[in-house]
Image (cartoon, rainbow, N blue to C red):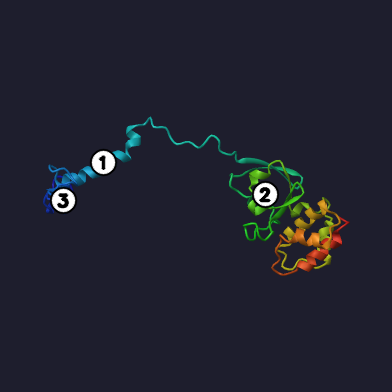
Amino acid sequence: MDEYGPYDPTVDYGCEPAIREIGPEGKDTLTWKPLNMSRRDFIRGVVCSGVVIAGAAYIFPGVPNARADARAVERLVSLTVNGRKRQVEVPPNETLAHTLRYRLGLTGTKIGCNRAECGACTVMADDTAIYACSTLTHRVRGKDIVTVEGVAAPDGTLHPVQQAFIDEIGPQCGFCTPGQVVTAVALLKKNPNPTVDEARLAMSGNLCRCGAYDHYLRGVMKAAGRA
């Protein structure tokens, strides 16, 4: 240990460079550090320069801090869900399915594929069936959202679609049933008396892993004219 502190292994080496480089004129020139600088001084200079750069914020306190873009989307959103106005804080990239399930507690909206393929997350926005997993919450501000929890009557009476699905033994495992119900309700709102082909086409966006497609289709046709 010397006057500078703990032992420095660089003192065991001379001042000559570890690798000599060839200059453009073909002469041996030392291009990696000044000729009059020792190896030890060079290493200390590099360390000191790093300390200076790291402390620039303290040396120049007038540098402004980074600020978020003033045009950022507001996080507080007002939603009308099942006839009730709800205010919820939502980041701009959050999907409606996530907001309904994890912020509003409406877990009837299922998240299956989470990429707009299975239909388990189907809800209505202004009486139009949409995939909640691929719809940003901020995009439905001002729209009337209806989930499967809002399909039945306020007194608990089942919607004709729900009763017809039960009568036709549509639900098997039940995971796809909420999306099937909402899709069928949206169809009958716009077309109270669809043909079998029209009903099949409207329900084609809902996958049933149990294969109960005919049961759901018969339920739609049974509820037609009563919804």
Front tag of 1 and 3: 3
Q: Which mark is residue 104?
A: 2
Give amino acid for label 1: Ser
**Disc 3 on helix, strand or loop?**
strand
Q: Quadrant of residue 45?
A: top left
Relative placement, left or right, of 52 versus 223 is left
Give amino acid for label 3: Ile
Indicate the position of residue 180 as horizontal and vertical percent values.
75, 60
How many angstroms separate mark 3 from mark 2 (CA)? 71 Å
Q: Could you tell which of marks 1 and 3 lies nearer the N-terminus?
A: 3
Front tag of 1 and 2: 1
Give amino acid for label 2: Leu
Is residue 7 something one can see in this rendering?
no
Q: Using a 10 Å C-alpha cutoff, classify the residue at mark 1 as few (fewer than 14 neighbours), some (14 to 19) or many (20 or more).
A: few
> Can you identify the residue that label 3 sits on?
22
Q: Tell me: residue 25, above or below residue 225.
A: above
Residue situated furthest right in the rendering = 225
Is residue 113 something one can see in this rendering?
yes
Q: Nearer the viewer, residue 23 or 83?
A: 23
> Can you identify the residue that label 1 sits on?
49
**Disc 1 on helix, strand or loop?**
helix
How many angstroms separate mark 1 from mark 3 (CA)? 27 Å
Relative placement, left or right, of 179 versus 160 is left
Question: Which residue: 51% across, 36% down?
Answer: 69
How many angstroms separate mark 1 from mark 2 (CA)? 54 Å
